[in-house]
Image: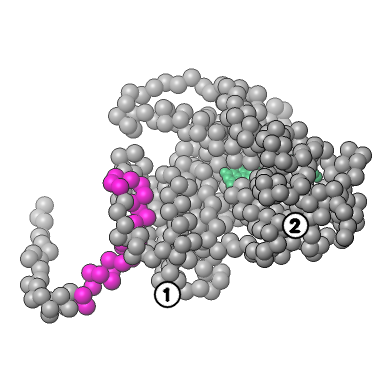
Amino acid sequence: MANYDFDMGILGGGAAGLTIASGAAQLGAKTLLIEKGKELGGDCLHFGCVPSKTLIRTANVYHLIKNAKHFGLPQVDLPPVDFKEVAKRIQSVISIIQKHDSEERFCKLGVRVEFGQATFVDEHNILLNGEKYSSKTWVIATGSSPSVPSIEGLDKTPYITNREIYSLERLPKTMIVLGAGPIAIEMAQAFCRLGTKVSVIQRSDQILTKEDKDMADQIMKVLSDEGVAFYLNTSVINTMEAGSEKEITIKRGEEVINVRGEIILVAMGRDANLNGLGLKDLDLDFDRAGIKVDHRLRTNQKHIFAAGDVTGEYQFTHAAGYEGGVVITNAIFHLPRRVDYTFFPWCTYTDPELASIGMNEKGAKAAGIKYSAWIEEFKDNDRSLAEGEHIGKIKMILDEREKPLGVQILGPHAGDLVSEWVAITNGRVKLSTLASAVHPYPTLGEINKRVAGTFLSGKIFSDRVRKGLKFFFNLKGRACEPLNRVITP
Ligand SMILES: Cc1cc2nc3c(=O)[nH]c(=O)nc-3n(C[C@H](O)[C@H](O)[C@H](O)COP(=O)(O)OP(=O)(O)OC[C@H]3O[C@@H](n4cnc5c(N)ncnc54)[C@H](O)[C@@H]3O)c2cc1C
């Protein structure tokens, strides 16, 4: 039997790689973790979830203060934002979390951490900083990078991506956002709230294209009302530098429009990080979107796994963590565990947030599944009104057997509210259990109970039930008929 230096070798110290390294080492596997950057933590910590959510919070606080009068408070005249201070706060949050993802912590767990660019020399050996390391099992968890489209002039026009946006020297007066996915839309609202005039350019007729149009349109309306300009159904013709600004020429139908901005943010999807790994020589299946894996996250070389953004599938930190667990079960316990994304949740952290789990109407229609949709609005939730939040709704999608296919929530704290549905869908909890379980009043969470109740009330308060009760218990029926008053002017 071949003797390898390590049981488990991992390329990439982000959410997926760290989950696998920690699990493997604690289970007794001799584990090597290789990170190309200077620190562990990956995109989520340094250029993704953590800085974006920190920035969003700052922008939302500024927005709230500016809108104090809506809460019965005196109007405040605020000085403009000093982005250096905002960037400082972002870095301080990152540095606190960095401690959880430190080399020392992983070393304590038993993981050997090395930094540098690793390249496969054959299917069990990699070359790193001039040294060869062998491992019985490898995991590629190298993440993804912003995809930069081939647009005429873009190579000569300065632009930024999520890697630069959190460390800007000052708040830009104007910004053009190319793309309208979650990263683009979160940043569009946050910068607009901080005081930047933002324009969003999008190819299709909808922002957040994975979501149902009614939900996405409601978010677009909120952002439009706050001052974000949207250019939908457009194709970009070219970009160029125009003095201190950048100019993007777009076409919408026959109309040609020039949009100018101090900064261009490119947020048009992600490419898997595969450069320099030597995958071609390994004969591994991959394309620009990512490494091809089976349901157990194995590549076509069965001892090489891939997890996280690099597979091009569900590009979220919690997906990377989940997939890390699936790799551990398969590679360390040797148990055949498959990934299952049926009830996979995610959230876009705009204000209001848009959270989803399972199938939406778009998905059900595409799959040819018959469904019914049940809706409750936040304007009918007492807590929501008390909080000054009246926009949004919950949409529950049921199949023909009246089992939940999915739920979408557009509203305050939607990302937290969807967690109840994580338990309901994964635990196959009956809607009647949700509807009869006591929820504290007044809470936003009551909307979950209420949508289930609305669906069930049609069955409980039916003519059939009324007739049965009348028959058995001699109930006398209505005590008041609707008043048909004629109102005279
Ligand atoms: C702006 C933004 C906001 C986001 N917000 C959210 C959010 O709110 N919620 C959420 O769930 N997700 C969010 N995401 C997505 C999330 O960041 C990713 O899904 C997550 O980081 C993926 O983890 P990963 O381990 O696959 O990759 P990464 O975290 O990117 O880690 C990969 C690591 O591999 C390293 N690497 C690359 N090449 C090599 C190599 N050849 N050798 C060794 N190491 C290598 C990289 O340096 C990196 O450290 C956001 C992303 C962005 C860009």
Marks 2/1 in contact by CB < 8 Å: the verdict is: no
Task: Please report the residue visible at 45 percent of the width from the left and 65 percent of the height from the top.
Answer: 428
Q: Amino acid at mark 1?
A: Arg
Q: Which mark is residue 462?
A: none
Q: Which mark is residue 401?
A: 1
Range of residues picked out in magenta: 440-465
Q: Is residue 385 left or right of residue 314?
A: left
Can you tell which quarter of the image residue 244 is in? top right
Does residue 69 sit above or below 449 in this rendering?
Answer: above
Q: What is the spatial separation of the Cα atoms under label 2 and label 1, in whole angstroms?
A: 37 Å
Does residue 105 sit above or below 407 in this rendering?
Answer: above
Quadrant position of the N terminus in the picture? bottom right
Mark 2 crowdedness (10 Å alpha carbons): few <14, some 14-19, many ≥20: many
Foreground pick, 264 / 98: 98
Task: Please report the residue visible at 50 percent of the width from the left and 34 percent of the height from the top.
Answer: 57
Q: Is residue 144 left or right of residue 342?
A: right
